[in-house]
Image: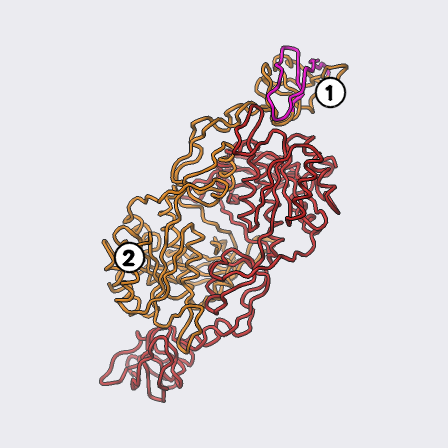
Chain colours: A red, B orange
Amino acid sequence: MPEFLTLLPPLEALNHLLKNLEHPRPALEWVATAEALGRVTVRAVPAPEALPPFTRSSVDGYAVQAADTHGASDSLPVYLKIVGEVAMGAAPDFSLQAGQAAVIHTGGMLPEGADAVVMLETTQPARGDEVEVLKAVAAGENLLVAGEDVTPGQEVIPAGRRLRAAEIGGLMALGVLEVAVAKPPCIGILSSGDEVIPPHDTPKPGQVRDINSYSLSAVVLHSGGAPVRLGVVPDQPQALRRAAEEALATCDALVITAGSSASARDLTATVVDGLGKPGVLVHGVSVRPGKPTILAVCDGKPVIGLPGNPVSALVIAGLFVRPVIERLLGLDRPPFLAALQARLTINLASQAGREDWIPVQLFRSDEGYLAEPIFFKSNLIFSLVQADGLVRIPPEANGLALGETIEVVLLQ
Amino acid sequence: MPEFLTLLPPLEALNHLLKNLEHPRPALEWVATAEALGRVTVRAVPAPEALPPFTRSSVDGYAVQAADTHGASDSLPVYLKIVGEVAMGAAPDFSLQAGQAAVIHTGGMLPEGADAVVMLETTQPARGDEVEVLKAVAAGENLLVAGEDVTPGQEVIPAGRRLRAAEIGGLMALGVLEVAVAKPPCIGILSSGDEVIPPHDTPKPGQVRDINSYSLSAVVLHSGGAPVRLGVVPDQPQALRRAAEEALATCDALVITAGSSASARDLTATVVDGLGKPGVLVHGVSVRPGKPTILAVCDGKPVIGLPGNPVSALVIAGLFVRPVIERLLGLDRPPFLAALQARLTINLASQAGREDWIPVQLFRSDEGYLAEPIFFKSNLIFSLVQADGLVRIPPEANGLALGETIEVVLLQ
């Protein structure tokens, strides 16, 4: 399992991994729609009823029979007899005949016999119980027709859709108070490295605290997964294998951050390859940072070996861990990535044939955003704390030029 | 309090509101750093110690005294005596003299006496306990020096910063296990309208279910606030006033969705204006949808009156509710808005002098994203469910042209 025999481009590597995952069947749970923000549907939701449930006025004015208003104008108004007012929240207790009008407010229920609403602004009070109509309306004008938004039985939300504010509101409008969503997939996270200790311990000389378990938990959570931190294991094959097997027995996927030496990384790859079939699919990706990435599927479960350097681990988690969680959630399409257009403040060189991701700080200027690259070392986590986003240098480029407009993917 | 006397542009209206809010003092709570994703710091965090805590190798190779390697090349290698191997996670139990080298792994602690590391790739095994160095290194080369990432006492995270994966990781690296963050501001949400009923009730003819309380709760939650749904009040001044006063007694801000008729909106404005000083600041914004928006500060607390139409309410919540919550959280700078560049698939007309927000569906094409406007009515919530984002037509434009590259703000 030595690394770097063939380096796949990141997107190809991801597709190779996803291709080897069976069609995911996310576990289902019912949650209150009001609490379902960000959750992903596992079944299409049909509308149990029509929306709006009755024909409503979309303006303040007068319910009328449109035919009565034909030819109405400022100079030749039509006079209609006001026979009532539609109370909000109730069915009108009258119906409309030819030559009649009824006061109606926005959202009010159209009385029987009426087929349009004249806007208040195109009317004028007349003597007695009459109103002057100054402009003709067509049948259906200024109405929201029953079922115009949604008809009964219509699929209003497909399976695999992440619920946003609009979906929550729409489901409540239909009285759909509970919704079947994917249980957050359980993502086991293991850190390895003889030098790594839990953050609540005080490092002795030569020791450092575990960063990756926590930063990766945040990525998992943000992507809709349930992180399970499994602690730190030493760089010993038996210990790593035992911990990984235990993780896969209960979790839906496993993320391991390898020790940072080449021998520790090879150890991780060997252990991962023995966890199940088909085993390691990709060992080495043409990306910087993150070349020593390991992608595997072991008996149906994805296993991702991330570089131990904390900056590399976070960048690579965005490229591989996030899409794997989205696949496990059953998302019906990849989400649109939050990104900004910005102009680069310096020239950036890169090696052709390799995809580079460079952390940048963003500044607002009169001509839009400026992106200032941060010179980082992939083992210094605070270089990423400085960054607002990442810029991708595509493999076919030799770099990016000062002043060039580039896309900055926001860090979450 | 009649609406629309002067229509302010949205940004001006927002600034007017924020100017009237005193400097926020968010309530503080301590939370476990590992659980603090998305929370906002209320105090700057200083580093309690250096990072890295000791000088480490950044490569696999040999720790050396750089002076020993001067002049080393493939044809004229330097021979050094291997005196030991640095174990990961421990201080070396030896120090290095001139003419000596020690095996070291990435992340290993530099032994005393050494001042650089030679990469494994530029060495060759030699006879006995010697190594051939094929390339000179300078002092400091291939090292992460103690304190290079962070020095003790350095402010590593300012007050008012939202914690992302990188910050969580960085704080754990420093052993900062708890962090002082802003308590989510309590945002009361009131729906008004005689026709509006709670979603768990079955609407009678003329009645519709409450949408806005739920869609706006989602916006509040997504922005970092704590939504408190206060239910539906009828369009009666006393009832609305009592409910609003009770809300302001316990909440940090109040959002009211007005009934959709002009009289209901005027009633809301009058009630809001009586809740405290200075009262209503803005009544009417030059934006579509959302013209009848009310912005107020009542005895130090922001009160926002949103249009009752669910699409308008959601669009306007993004323009006003979100930034108000960010202000209450004490964010040190406005967040960068997630947006995409896309090409418009049709011409879009608009009225100059007014800012328009148009829902669009996004499609991927070989030349990037395409944005297809959705013809919506602001009272049909499912027209927003269809949308991936919103396109802004600026007030100075008469519209946007087919093929034009535009910014699409993603809906959350």
Dot 1 or dot 2: first in sequence order is: 1
Q: Which mark is residue B282?
A: 2
A45 to B12, vertically: above or below: below
Amino acid type at mark 2: Val
Quarter of the rendering occupied by the N terminus of chain B: bottom left
Residue range in magenta is B75-104
Q: Nearer the viewer, residue A61 or A304?
A: A304
Q: Nearer the viewer, residue A296 or B263?
A: A296
Q: Chain of mark 1?
A: B
A116 to B403, vertically: above or below: below
Q: How many marks?
A: 2
Q: Are marks 1 and 2 in contact (CB under 8 Å)?
A: no
Amino acid type at mark 1: Gln
Using the rendered view, name the quadrant where residue B356 is placed. bottom left
Q: Is residue B94 magenta?
A: yes
Under tag 1, what secondary structure? strand
Residue A72: x and y, percent?
Answer: 33, 82
- Residue at 55% across, 65% down: A157
Residue B154: x and y, percent?
Answer: 43, 29
The residue beneath circle 1 is B124
Using the rendered view, name the quadrant where residue B247 is placed. bottom left
**Residue A365 visible in rendering:** no
Badge 1 and badge 2 both on one subunit: yes
Under tag 2, what secondary structure? strand
Distance in Å between CA atoms under marks 1 and 2:
76 Å
Q: Nearer the viewer, residue B263 or A245?
A: A245
Q: Chain of mark 2?
A: B
Q: Nearer the viewer, residue B221 or B379?
A: B221
Q: Which mark is residue B247?
A: none
